[in-house]
Amino acid sequence: MDEGHPTPAARLYDGGLTASCPPWAAVRSHFTETTTYLPCILTTITHAVTAGAAGQPSRATVLIDGLQKTLRQDVAAALRAQLQPRQIRLEKVRGLDEQSDALMRLADALAGFVRHGLEGRPALATLLADSHRRGVIRLLQA
């Protein structure tokens, strides 16, 4: 694994997870009670998709960097159970490899940018604050 572009599982270092979703919203979750991959990622994705739906009936396709095929059905079932009461229909869940998918590389880069900005790296923190102020990036707390 390339340490410069970690998978969501690797992003769980220190109990934090960053996810991105259109239109360039980023959700930063920080978990102190658990760093178990599946509950953390389900909570973060549910929050991101729910925020994107803005209370309207919606449909969602979820793409997860590095999701193993063996976990895909379990993740899809758990997300459907969490999203259906919110009137969000989960179309499908796919695991992608950031190395072979441009959209996943873009989402990963955005999530890394937001994470580093929130962690206080000076140049990125300034750029993130400006992007947030202009409405280019929305920051949501899970």
Image (cartoon, rainbow, N blue to C red):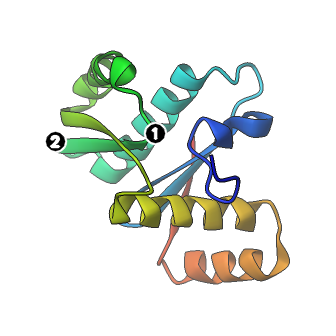
Residue 56 in view of the camera: yes
User: Residue at the location (16% across, 42% down)?
Assistant: 57
- Tell me: residue 80, above or below residue 12: above
Q: Amino acid at mark 2?
A: Pro
Q: Amino acid at mark 1?
A: Gly
User: Residue at the location (61% across, 57% down)?
Assistant: 5
Q: Secondary structure at mark 2?
A: loop
Query: Are the two marked residues, 1 and 2, in contact with CB atoms closer than 8 angstroms?
Result: no
- Tell me: residue 90, above or below residue 50: above
Along the line of sight, the residue nearer the viewer: 101 or 85: 101
Q: Residue 130 at x, y = what percent? A: 63, 83
- Badge 1 or badge 2: first in the primary sequence: 2
Q: Secondary structure at mark 1?
A: loop
Along the line of sight, the residue nearer the viewer: 100 or 120: 100
The quarter holding residue 68 reads top left
Residue 142 lies left or right of residue 45; in this view the side is right
Residue 80 lies left or right of residue 74; in this view the side is left
Classify mark 1: residues with Cα within 10 Å, few (<14), some (14-19) or many (20+).
some
Q: Residue 20 at x, y = what percent? A: 47, 55
Residue that mark 1 sits on: 66
Q: Which mark is residue 94?
A: none
Residue 114 lies left or right of residue 49; in this view the side is right
